[in-house]
Image (cartoon, rainbow, N blue to C red):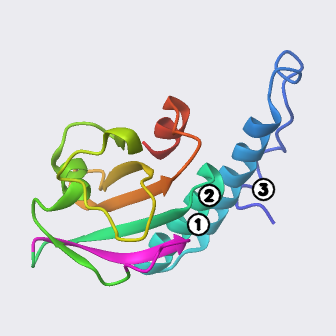
Amino acid sequence: MSPYPHVPPCADPPALGDRVSADDRAALGILLDLSQALLSAQVRSEVEAILTRQSVRLLGTRYALFLRYLPELDVLRVTAQAGQHADDLGRTLPRGQGASWRAALGPDPVLHLRREHLPPWAMRRAGVPPQHVLYAPLRSSSGRLLGVLTVGREDPPFLRRDEHLLA
């Protein structure tokens, strides 16, 4: 049952129906699934797990990680993961270390690193091929840092559309 019973089911407007691609329809379906799953989440760890799982589906990524900000320690810690090469659960990054902190402390809604131009401060894992990576800091409505959602894949490169989906 819909959490919004008062809202009628949405159909494609006739003017747009032929121009909505299959990829867009699939993405909208995943966003709807994400929205419904988040509405049912009871605790922070459930929200983080849902975000990582659905990000892998939505963006077709190899992996997704959620790094929760722990203000009492001033660190980012991996608290949720999904996909291949996602074996970082519990890993902790001190302030300023790695691209996740660059994203968290930077002005942009999403930090986009292309695999062919990875900067020296981007952490690489042994045995894992270079990836295109997006880092999206998540903040409370008051601007307080909650964490960073990180997604990566080998190919295809991320598009502006992918950045907007995470922002």
Q: Position of residue 4 (x, y in %)?
A: 71, 55
Tag 3 secondary structure: loop
Tell me if mark 1 has few (under 14), some (14-19) or many (20+) residues whose alpha carbon lies within 10 angstroms of its own. Answer: few
Residue 71 or residue 105, whichever sits in front: 105
C-alpha distance separating marks 2 and 1: 6 Å
Does 2 sit left or right of 98 as displayed?
right
**Answer yes or no: do the residues labelled 2 and 3 have beta carbons within 8 Å?**
no
Q: Which residues are magenta?
A: 74-88
Tell me if mark 2 has few (under 14), some (14-19) or many (20+) residues whose alpha carbon lies within 10 angstroms of its own. Answer: some
Residue 58 or residue 45, whichever sits in front: 58
Is 53 part of what is drawn in magenta?
A: no
Question: For the point 35% across and 51% down, which residue is it?
Answer: 135
Residue corresponding to mark 3:
5
Residue 36 lies in quadrant? bottom right
Residue corresponding to mark 1:
39
Q: Amino acid at mark 1?
A: Leu
Residue 30 lies in quadrant? bottom right
Tag 1 secondary structure: helix
